[in-house]
Image (cartoon, rainbow, N blue to C red):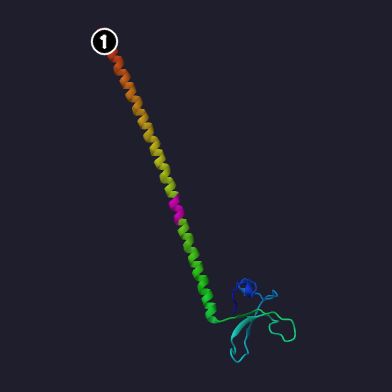
Amino acid sequence: MSSSISSSSFGKCTLGIPFCFCEEPATLRLARTAKNPGRPFLGCLKYNTKGLPYCRFFKWVDINEEENELQQRESTNEFLMKEKEVEKKLDNVHKREIEVMKKELVLREQEAEIKHSRRLLWLYWTFALLWAFWLLLGSV
């Protein structure tokens, strides 16, 4: 049974295998106390060695705790997947918004060209009518 301990107060953890404070892989052991007989825990091989320097790394390994950690990882993964989906959808919305804005800009430019062409046409016909009128008055 492995535990994924990430807190610095519990040593290092690599690939789901926790390491004790002396950077050795923690081992699964069973408690031999009257209060917790047979309860699994993770500890250093040097844990609680009498008269010798020993590592103080200790972590209870409860099945409920393992299930909770697994559920938390699954929930986190599900949340991250949904977050990526939302980001993709938002990105698509932004792309569509940019496309619409580009089309609006093209339409505005076309409208401005049409207005300019209408003004030029109005000036042309006004000048042509004035010229024709002037020619008529000059020949009379």
Q: Residue at x 42, y 44 (%)?
A: 101
Residue drawn at 65 percent across, 81 percent down = 43
Report whether 109 appears left or right of 74.
left
**Badge 1 element:** helix
State the image quarter where residue 48 is shown.
bottom right
Q: Residues within 10 Å of mark 1 (few under 14, many from 20)?
A: few
Q: Is residue 133 above or below residue 7?
A: above
- Choose top left, top right, bottom left or bottom right for residue 131: top left
Q: Is residue 93 magenta?
A: yes
Q: Is residue 131 left or right of residue 47?
A: left
How would you classify the magenta stretch by its main secondary structure?
A: helix
Identify the residue at horizontal 45%, vertical 55% (top origin).
90
**Where in the figure is residue 95, as x and y percent of width and height?**
45, 49
Magenta residues (range): 89-94
Q: Position of residue 105 (x, y in %)?
A: 41, 40
Q: Is residue 118 above or below residue 94?
A: above
Residue identifier under label 1: 137
Residue type at mark 1: give it: Leu
- Residue at image coords 29%, 18%: 129
Farthest residue, direction left: 140
Residue 87 against residue 54 in the figure, above or below: above
Seen from the viewer's position, the closer of residues 56 and 119 is 56
Residue farthest to the top, as pictured: 140
Q: Which image quarter is the C terminus in?
A: top left
User: Where in the figure is residue 85, as x and y percent of width and height?
Assistant: 46, 60
Residue 39, horizontal then vertical, whole percent: 59, 86
The residue at the far bottom in this view is 34
Q: Count of labels shown?
A: 1
Image quadrant in which the N terminus is located = bottom right
Q: Is residue 5 above or below residue 95?
A: below
> Would you say residue 61 sits in the magenta stretch?
no
Task: Give the quarter of the image for residue 55.
Answer: bottom right
